[in-house]
Image (spheres, coloured by chain):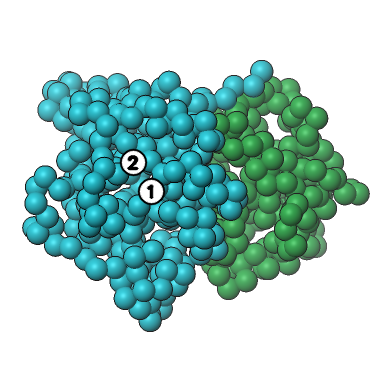
Chain colours: A cyan, B green
Amino acid sequence: MVEKGTYRVKSGLAEMLKGGVIMDVTTAEQAIIAEQAGAVAVMSLERVPADIRAQGGVARMADPTRVKEILAAVSIPVMAKARIGHFVEAQVLEALEVDYIDESEVLTPADPQYHIDKWAFTVPFVCGARNLGEACRRIAEGAAMIRTKGEPGTGNVVEAVRHMRLMNKQIRLVLSAPTGELMSIAKEMGAPYQILLAIREKGKLPVVNFAAGGIATPSDAAMMMQLGCDGIFVGSGVFKSGDPEKRARAIVEATTHYKEPGIVASVSEGLGEAMVGISIDEIPPHEMMQVR
Amino acid sequence: MRVGVLAVQGAVREHLSILSQLGIDGRRVKKVGELSGLSGLILPGGESTTISLLSRGHLLTKVGELVSKGFPVFGTCAGMILLAGEIEGQEDAYVQAIDITVARNASGRQVDSFETMLCVKGVADDFPAVFIRAPYITRIGNGVTVLAKHEGAAVMARQGNVLVASFHPELTSDMRIHRYFIGMVKEYEEKEAVL
């Protein structure tokens, strides 16, 4: 008997991406650059977060034509973003046979209250989280991979760091607390109790956790890896920089060799202009993507 | 006994965990120097293009040299692609340690990834196999033994000291295939001791 879309098959693909970099791309040309630079997967979307932030308007899933071109152009897995709660965008992306769907706060949410019921799909989902409660709720909804949200399109790593440190701290609490305190922790965090039990059994989050949102340099990537994430998402950081080919490769190298400052130093030389960064304090509260 | 796991990218942790459960001293291998003192090497699942691009300092070339001297290696999924003699649709292959041709993503895209029970010759009648965007073996060279097939396609094979599988035994708690590989490593250690 052959079983497709099992949770092991869904989370298993994310396990295979560990230690790698997933890059946002809007065209097949960019996808090829990402693959040749050593990306483990590409993320297809209509506009990169920095452009969404600058241009405003409603950000939606990518045009199926673009998605198909990207699927045809590379042999690495192709992910694609759907709006939070937009289960039909997700159905469309599944019909296009993308390898992973990112239910993403980078796009304009389609449902003010609910996320997609991800158990209803064969294709696996990755979701963003700022803390352990969010991560556990998304996992309970069927997400097979988590990424910390950071603040997308800013080129500013501070929020990614904040979210990763908080999640690590909360996981340490869950692992060290006496069993009798776990239900109260679940209530405070807004985390389903069963998922906390799974964390205690595994000694870690039950799925892979990548870092995302603001990673723009090789050092940013290496820092997130040293903070304990399983891999890196780069959104605007590559294709909004002066030399995408070189920067993409450098971020990949720094992610692999994150414990070796000598290598991070050498790949960081002469990368040209990094993307323009935005201070988090300058973003009006209603334009923060992470709260979605 | 020390066995390495190529640790450039991919399912490294899972292989190390199984090795440790089998009482084997598992080591991460990212650099050529880390190959010394090992009696075998596992090339894990991951993205083969990424792993090959990032294997610095001729790491894969060195693996190839060791294999030709009898050093046992086991490649799962991407690891099988790295060890294959030929890759469909691609001019160059990587380590070229086993005389087979493989087709990348032959099982299809992720929506077609699957689990099934496999009969693995000499290992198990009922091995839980997880196939993720899996490569299949499309040509078997002389001296290569097919150990498992799925719907007619060869998905596990051995040629002397080289073992390859399309699927991911490291994603299950079934350690029989790893035990089989450790058997190959023991044979190698015994031979080396005699020499």
Which chain is disc 1 placed on? Answer: A
Please tell me which residue is depicted at 78% across the width and 34% down the height of the picture. Answer: B153
Badge 2 vs badge 1, beta-carbon distance below 8 Å: yes
Please tell me which residue is depicted at 52% across the width and 55% down the height of the picture. Answer: A28
Residue position marked by numbered label 2 in the rendering? A60
Q: How many marks?
A: 2
Question: In which quadrant will I find the C terminus of chain A?
Answer: top left
Q: Are marks 2 and 1 on the same chain?
A: yes
Identified by mark 1, the residue type is Glu
Which chain is disc 2 placed on? Answer: A
**Among the two numbered marks 2 and 1 on one chain, the one whose residue lies closer to the N terminus:** 1
Question: Quick check: A177 left or right of B21?
Answer: left
Image location (x, y in percent) of residue A246: 45, 72
Question: In which quadrant will I find the N terminus of chain A?
Answer: top right
Identified by mark 2, the residue type is Arg
Please tell me which residue is depicted at 14% across the width and 23% down the height of the picture. Answer: A187
Image location (x, y in percent) of residue A184: 13, 23
Q: Which mark identifies residue A46? A: 1
Mark 1 secondary-structure assignment: loop
